[in-house]
Image (cartoon, rainbow, N blue to C red):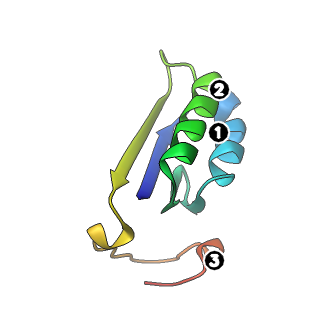
Amino acid sequence: MYLIVTYDIEEKRVAKVLKTCRKYLKWVQNSVFEGPITEGKLEKLKLELEKIIDEEKDSVRFYVMDSESAFELQTMGKVKEEYGFVV
């Protein structure tokens, strides 16, 4: 499966959320991660984030797709080099 994660987190927890997401996915923009992931790793990611975020103040969104080919990516401007390719 392919996953896109976006988040809006209070500043004091952002670094922990960033570090956690980087263990599983590629960082493509501020507060946006994406990449292939297994169901097991997705559940581990969610459990780790659940321990960090404040559900009253923070928001995390998971866009789960069957594969990377399930959508068309179009970009403008700078692409983070960490991702490894330019579309």
In terms of image quadrants, where is residue 82?
Answer: bottom right
Q: Residue at x 46, y 46 (%)?
A: 6
Which residue is nearer to you in this view: 44 or 53?
Answer: 44
Q: Residue furthest bottom?
A: 86
Q: Give the numbered dot on residue 81.
A: 3
Q: Give the numbered dot on residue 17.
A: 1
Q: Position of residue 47 (x, y in %)?
A: 59, 30
The earlier-in-sequence mark between 1 and 2 is 1
Which residue is tagged 2? 52
Q: Give the numbered dot on residue 64.
A: none
Label 2 crowd bin: few (<14), some (14–19), many (20+), radius 10 Å: some
Q: Amino acid at mark 3?
A: Glu
Q: Amino acid at mark 1?
A: Val
Q: Amino acid at mark 2?
A: Ile
Q: CA distance from mark 2 to mark 3?
A: 27 Å
Is residue 50 something that shows in the picture? yes
Q: Residue at x 36, y 51 (%)?
A: 64
Up-down relation of residue 32 to residue 35 (above or below): above
Label 1 crowd bin: few (<14), some (14–19), many (20+), radius 10 Å: many
Up-down relation of residue 52 to residue 80 (above or below): above
Q: Position of residue 86 (x, y in %)?
A: 50, 84
Q: CA distance from mark 1 to mark 2?
A: 7 Å
